[in-house]
Amino acid sequence: MKIIKMRHPYQSDLIPNDEVVLALGFFDGVHRGHQEVLKKARMVAEEKNLKLAAMTFDHHPSVVFNHRRGSTIGTKYLTSVERKATLMDDLGVDVLYVVNFTSLFAKQNPEEFIQNYIIGLHAKSVVAGFDYTFGPQETANMTTLPVLSNGRFDVYSINPVQQDLVKVSSTQTRDWIIDGDIDSANEFLGYPFETKGLVVHGEARGRTLGFPTANIISDINQITLGIGIYVAEIKIGSQWYHAMASVGRNVVFGDGRPVTTEINILDFNGEVYGETVKIRWYHRLRGEEKFASVEDLINQLNVDEQNTRDFFKKL
């Protein structure tokens, strides 16, 4: 897959000459709803013998549109641009346009957007979710786009995907992750939620308990899970290892401690400080508990380890 980064106004020689089917969306998480958009776009591309292109943004539009000072809305993501690209590549996207969403880009009127980012990208068909907008919500949406196209391209609007009568969405997925409900989040994603981080030195207390951990610092824009104990996998180099993970404050050792992410890697004794690792989050085992003694904590960690091993046997 070819990745093309764009800043408005872009140079036309950046754009390949091939006619394409163009999938539009922010695609945070590339969840099951997004996957339906991309599958439909892939099907249309194959029917018309065209390449499949997708367009996303380097950050959420709310970064530009939200005027509240210090607001962080839109800055905690399910997927980085790098992760989006990997998922889209797996779904058959040939070209991924990553547009720098700026105030200048946002000032385009609907016809300018169509001319620059649909016609300009040689799109013969456009596919997007039913709620996609490209300007004022009342006049630049998936109902008005077929009219505004004026026959220059076809438009396919994809209905919402539902799970247990709840619409699959990035917002709900983020909420579940923040709450620690990784099981529900993964149902919406259609794959295990994945994060990336750097292994740093911690207090080394886990080693004294018989459960050495890798302490992880994630990117500031990466959404992180709510407090709890989880079944996970960690990728070190090219190898994935089974693991159990703790997101919490280590309350057994005192109150008011900062939240940390610690990974106990099963059947692993290597040194990993300074490694950039990936973590897949599969299942929440339990919440964080304040045990009466260190011995009680160790006993529970042994139960957690066995439950983790049992999970992967069933998986």
Image (cartoon, rainbow, N blue to C red):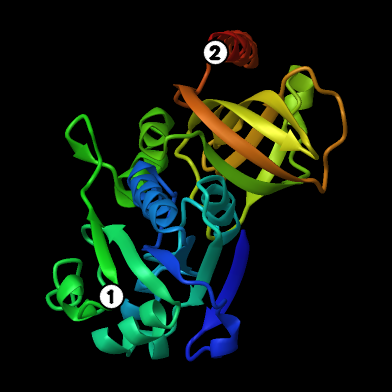
User: Height in image: 160 above or below 145?
Assistant: above
Which label lies toward us, 1 or 2? 1
Residue lying at 42% horizontally and 33% vertically, measured from the top left: 186
**CA neighbours of label 1 inside 10 A, class few (<14), some (14 to 19), many (20+):** some
Regarding residue 68, the answer to whether it shows in the image is no
Specify whether 17 is left or right of 104: right
Give coordinates of residue 61: x percent, y percent.
37, 73
Regarding residue 112, the answer to whether it shows in the image is yes
**Residue 140 falls in image quadrant:** bottom left
Q: Amino acid at mark 1?
A: Phe
Report the quarter where the N terminus lies. Answer: bottom right
The residue to which callout 1 is attached is: 134
Question: Regarding mark 2 in the picture, which secondary structure is present there?
Answer: helix
Q: Amino acid at mark 2?
A: Phe
In this rendered view, identify the residue nearer to me: 308 or 84: 84
Give coordinates of residue 60: x percent, y percent.
41, 68
The residue to which callout 2 is attached is: 311
User: Height in image: 135 above or below 214?
Assistant: below
User: Height in image: 262 above or below 294?
Assistant: below
**CA neighbours of label 2 inside 10 A, class few (<14), some (14 to 19), many (20+):** some
In this rendered view, identify the residue nearer to me: 215 or 222: 222
Distance between mark 1 and mark 2 Cα atoms: 44 Å
Specify whether 93 is left or right of 146: right
Specify whether 262 is left or right of 7: right
Question: Regarding mark 1 in the picture, which secondary structure is present there?
Answer: loop
